[in-house]
Amino acid sequence: MDLRAILMGLAFSFMWSSAFASARMIVMDAPPLTALAVRFALSGAIAVGIAAALGQSARLTRAQWRNVVIFGICQNALYLGLNFVAMVRVEAGLASIIASMMPLMVAALGWAVFDTRVRPLGVAGLAAGFAGAAIIMGTRLEGGVDPAGVAMCLAGMTALAVATLALRGAASGGNLLMVVGLQMWVGALVLAPAAWLTEVPAVTWTPRLFAAFAYTTLVPGLLATLLWFHLVGRIGAVKAATFHFLNPFFGVAVAALLLGERLQVWDIAGVAIIAAGILAVQRSRAAGPG
């Protein structure tokens, strides 16, 4: 792995993890589903516009449209929608820790549902990762964290893991930016009616809201997604996925720095165990098939 790939991986992990803090800022001032639907509409318009200018076509294959619909619903509407609603109830650091377990959930579901072989190191990594999560959840629940918010984060993370497994090997066919933009529009179309039915569109217009919304739309929403696909193309999916083990650290660090969220000793211990579990699972995959 060359220096450029390492820098790309670090940048992706930081951008992805920072999205939880910016989302927490947004939901302090605006209804979560309404804000997210508007964000997807804008991000999608930017991505589709740039893609069209680059000559990318919206005439997709059947497999590409399947990619667009499944990821648009599971990643954008369910995963991010549930996380935005949850962050009205729970802190950004906790939401980022739960979301960072996604590679573990993918490996566990692959093992249980698709009978994917898991090496002993991978099994140990799965056990460690879920043990670390149990430590954090136990201490947070005892401290009074909202169980409904935690359940929403877990449901969203599971939806993204299912989509990841369903689209194993899916390709963009050279229309990457167009596919990303259309996925965002699918998310907006699903979330807009839900927002209209369940939320009162009361917004507190603050500089914090404008800054967080712009950052979330452009950096985690567009730049991190494109950077991830370029990283996978450069070093492969298995090596690229090892950068996920940094997500719990970046997530809690950014939330503590920007939002002043307090960390407990058990939080730090649980994050370290989860990160070690993710790394073990990825190293197990790199060691050979299965």
Image (tube, grey):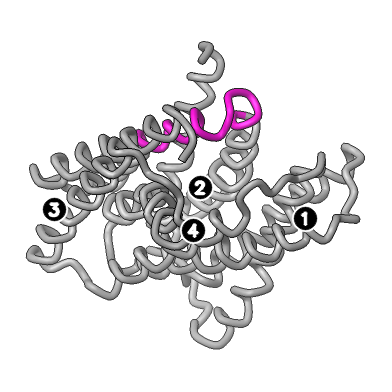
Q: Nearer the viewer, mark 2 or mark 3?
A: 3
> Dot 3 corresponds to which residue?
135
For the record, the magenta segment spans: 231-246
Residue type beneath disc 1? Gln
Residue type beneath disc 4? Phe
In the rendered image, the vertical position of residue 4 relative to residue 173, given as above or below: above
User: Is disc 1 placed on a helix, strand or loop?
Assistant: helix
Residue type beneath disc 2? Ala
Give the mark nearest the N terminus, 4 or 2. Answer: 4
> Dot 4 corresponds to which residue?
114
Overall secondary structure of the magenta stretch? Answer: helix
Q: Residues within 10 Å of mark 4 (few under 14, many from 20)?
A: few
Q: Position of residue 16 (x, y in %)?
A: 47, 42
> Dot 1 corresponds to which residue?
64
Q: Nearer the viewer, mark 2 or mark 1?
A: 1
User: Is disc 3 placed on a helix, strand or loop?
Assistant: helix
Give the mark nearest the N terminus, 4 or 3. Answer: 4
Q: Nearer the viewer, mark 4 or mark 3?
A: 4
> Dot 2 corresponds to which residue?
211
The residue at the point 55 percent across, 71 percent down is 34
Q: Residue furthest top?
A: 3
Callout 4 touching callout 2 (CB < 8 Å): no
Q: Position of residue 177 (x, y in %)?
A: 75, 44
Q: Residue furthest bottom?
A: 197
Image-quadrant location for residue 83: bottom left
The Cα atoms of the two marked residues, 4 and 2, are separated by: 43 Å
Give the mark nearest the N terminus, 4 or 1. Answer: 1
The residue at the point 24 percent across, 52 percent down is 130
User: Is disc 2 placed on a helix, strand or loop?
Assistant: helix
Q: Residues within 10 Å of mark 2 (few under 14, many from 20)?
A: few
Callout 4 touching callout 3 (CB < 8 Å): no
The Cα atoms of the two marked residues, 2 and 3, are separated by: 34 Å
